[in-house]
Image (cartoon, rainbow, N blue to C red):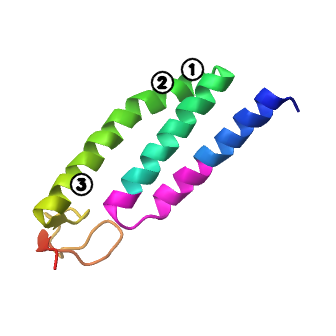
């Protein structure tokens, strides 16, 4: 295994780990931070190996995650937290089955 390939594989595995961490996050801020990290690592991975589909996908996802992360930070500064659940559901449960409310004040 040559040095450039070893570096690319290391970056690829790091990107995969960041993606798993993003899927494990329960709060939106850490999820977006992990997703941004994964996007940056996958962009590097795609560029190192010339993988255009990977590169283009994460170049599109990165600004979306940055924008959502910024909105999350602004809401946090305003003291309002939104749940992830669909609020039109009659039993007020999200797709994962957890109880939620439309908006709650951060104590």
Q: Quadrant of residue 1?
A: top right
| Residue 48 horizontal/vertical position (percent) | 65, 25
In this rendering, position of residue 78 left or right of residue 95: left
In this rendering, position of residue 94 left or right of residue 17: left
Determine whether 101 is above or below 43 in the image: below
Which residue in the protein does label 2 denote? 56
Q: In the structure shown, which secondary structural element does the residue marked by tag 1 occupy?
A: helix
Residue ranking furthest to the right: 1
Contact between labelled residues 1 and 3, with CB atoms less than 8 Å apart? no
Which residue in the protein does label 3 denote? 72
Q: Which residues are magenta?
A: 16-30
Q: In the structure shown, which secondary structural element does the residue marked by tag 2 occupy?
A: helix
User: Which numbered disc, 3 or 1, marks the residue closer to the eye?
Assistant: 3
Instruction: Pick whichever, 77 or 49, lies toward us.
Output: 77
Quarter in which the C terminus is drawn: bottom left
Q: In the structure shown, which secondary structural element does the residue marked by tag 3 occupy?
A: helix
Query: Which residue does the image show at 43% across and 64% down from the upper left?
Result: 25
Q: Is residue 57 magenta?
A: no
Contact between labelled residues 1 and 2, with CB atoms less than 8 Å apart? yes
Reading the chain from its start, which is encountered first: label 3 or label 1?
A: 1
Reading the chain from its start, which is encountered first: label 2 or label 3?
A: 2
Q: Residues within 10 Å of mark 3 (few under 14, many from 20)?
A: some
Determine whether 21 is above or below 102 in the image: above
Give residue 52's mark: 1
């Amino acid at each position: 295994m040559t040095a450039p390939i070893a570096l690319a594989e290391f970056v690829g595995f790091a990107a995969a780990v960041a993606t798993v961490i993003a899927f494990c996050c329960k709060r939106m801020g850490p999820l977006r931070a992990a997703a941004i990290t994964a996007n940056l690592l996958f962009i590097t991975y795609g560029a190192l190996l010339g993988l255009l589909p990977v590169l283009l996908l994460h170049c599109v996802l990165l600004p979306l995650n940055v924008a959502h992360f910024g909105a999350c930070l602004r809401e946090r500064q305003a003291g309002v937290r939104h749940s992830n659940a669909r609020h039109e559901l009659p039993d007020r449960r999200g797709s994962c089955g957890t109880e939620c409310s439309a908006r709650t004040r951060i104590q």
